[in-house]
Image (spheres, rainbow, N blue to C red):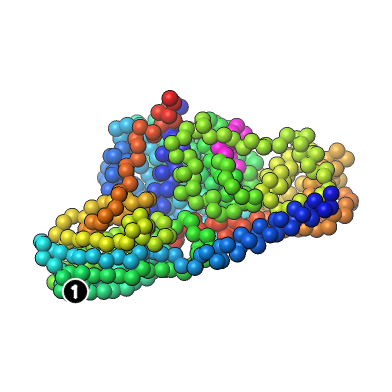
Amino acid sequence: MIKKSVRLMLLFTLLLLFGGAAVALTDIGKLCIFSAISGVITLNGQPVAHARLIRTGEKERTHQDETTTDENGYFAFPPMYERSIAKFLPMEFVASQTIMVEYKGKKYKLWSGVKWKPEENAESRGKPLVVQCQLEIDDKYISVDGSKFFTLCTWDVEPDPPFDMNKVFESDMED
Amino acid sequence: MNEITPGFAATLARDVYKIVDSSSLASAIRQLDFDYKGSFAFNQQNLLKGKTGGPGIIKCRTAFGFTLIGQGHLKGHAFILFRGTKFLADWLTNLNAGVSSSACGYPVHDGFNTTFNTMKPKLQAFMNYARSQNIHSVHCIGHSLGGAVATVCAEWIAKSYSTPYLYTFGSPRVGLMGFANSCTQRLGQQRIFRAYHRTDIVPFVPSWPFIHTPDKGRDYYLPSPGIIPWKTYHSMDRYIQSVQNRSWKAIGSRPNTHSNGAIENWLKQNTVVAFTLSNIEWLNDAIVYVLKKCVNKVGWGISNTFGSALTLMDKMAYILKKGIDLAQSISTSVVHLLNKMMLMLGYSQNTVYAMEYTHAIIRRLFMRLQYRLMNHANQALSQVLVKGQNI
């Protein structure tokens, strides 16, 4: 009887140890709150050159960085990370994102959204996030794998379908 | 019955996290309009007019609420969605937090109750508006701490308006026996949908004497892997995966609820008790069983005394100690229970006799177990909560 209990305890301890180790080894401890994003910005078909871009990512803290477009309206931001206690077991994750563009004395909200998964490139289902943006249009809403965005940009990604409104009531579910 | 599906309730519970501080009501409306094909009505003038929150959004430091009126397919339905912030988590995991009196006068956790009371004026305005719109079904929905606030809210709606539906995912325990009992009766078991993953740690807190609502009828048990309760299966995404495209009917209830006889047997076994999920389930059932046994003899008297959790532990220790002193039949159960708790905490297997259990020792045992569970839960909760400063 005692032997069995000791064995159980040992198993339990091992499980705890190994569980801990697995987390420590596989998780580099960074959460991606804004994936690397690059692309081209135009206004009425013309490249938006030398515009100032201010990117903000926010989870536990606010992070901000800046870049400028080149002659061709091209810009690129590296990934933005946050370290927090959430790193060990990333789960309920909400990071808000914005990119503002300042061009010829005017401000445009290029991007605002909520990133719902901590993985890199969650905004584009794992692919690099490469966008085309038009400052003259109205922003569009897009939901990608639970993340939600309002943006002047488009990128190659399959949007989430709306909720199936035929599955709203319990009575709808009966065959 | 007009209950909504687990998939729909879960998606709404998730969406209330997305309406973060940075987004305006207008963008929230656009999101919901698209995601739910225009099934919600937004009457800016008639909906809540908060000073800062604007119509539809109810903010306070400890929680966030979103109110919706259905149209088209959802005509006649109103929805109140809740989400907690990390400030509410601090409260929940603070052993000094106590209980206060719910809308119907029953003891609930002070953190949830105060949060609800802060939001109440706006909820009242919403409910009055809903009434003018001939709403026949109100659905209160929340995940985690939001589920707890939804429960307190549902009791109030049942008292002041009409009987609502309540849907919670991975909710912590909200109140003491009196509250669980009264809330279950008021709402009716068939209108309460408490879904939880087996290995989600959050439903294990706060510890006894807090218990879940409903206290009878069925729960909606979602099997999940693991031998100890942990945080992974607390995430809303996991809940969505588990309930998607299913009906409530298709979700089972907890299979291994223990009979009184089985509990007595379990209590008698004097073997090592690891801190595993199955043992925590046993212990939960055993504590409720033994406490009820004592309460029947000694009287509970707790609903009128609203103190801190420390006082509650005192009260439990007092009741159990009384149980030991009063009657042999109860005494045996109490001692078995306390021995079991000692074993779970890793103390030696030497039998402790009834007279050795003083009030102070009993209280300490409860505190230790509580502390152990809280430690787990703290970590789980820190994952769930959005940044609370601006909410």
Residue depicted at 71% across the width and 44% down the height: B282
Q: Nearer the viewer, residue B349 or A7?
A: A7
Q: Is A44 left, or right, of B221 in this rendering? A: left
Question: Above or below — where is B164 with respect to A25?
Answer: above
Callout count: 1
Residue depicted at 29% across the width and 53% down the height: A157
Q: Residues within 10 Å of mark 1 (few under 14, many from 20)?
A: some
Q: Position of residue A11 (x, y in %)?
A: 71, 56
Question: Above or below — where is B253 with respect to A24?
Answer: above
Q: Is A154 left, or right, of B303 in this rendering? A: left
Q: Position of residue B344 (x, y in %)?
A: 75, 53
Residue depicted at 59% across the width and 35% down the height: B253
Question: Above or below — where is B87 with respect to B301?
Answer: below
Question: Above or below — where is B111 with respect to A102?
Answer: above
Q: Which structural element holds mark 1?
A: loop
Residue depicted at 53% across the width and 41% down the height: B195
Tell whether position B371 is magenta. Answer: no
Residue B301 in sight: no
Q: Position of residue B387 (x, y in %)?
A: 44, 61
Give residue B140's quadrant in the image.
top left
Q: Position of residue A19 (x, y in %)?
A: 61, 59
Q: Is B36 left, or right, of B305 in this rendering? A: left
Residue A24 in sight: yes
Q: Nearer the viewer, residue B319 or A14?
A: A14
Give residue A20's quadrant in the image.
bottom right
User: Dot 1 corresponds to which residue?
Assistant: A70
Q: Is A93 left, or right, of B29 in this rendering? A: right
Which residues fall within the magenta stretch? B212-221
Pinpoint the chain carrying mark 1. Answer: A
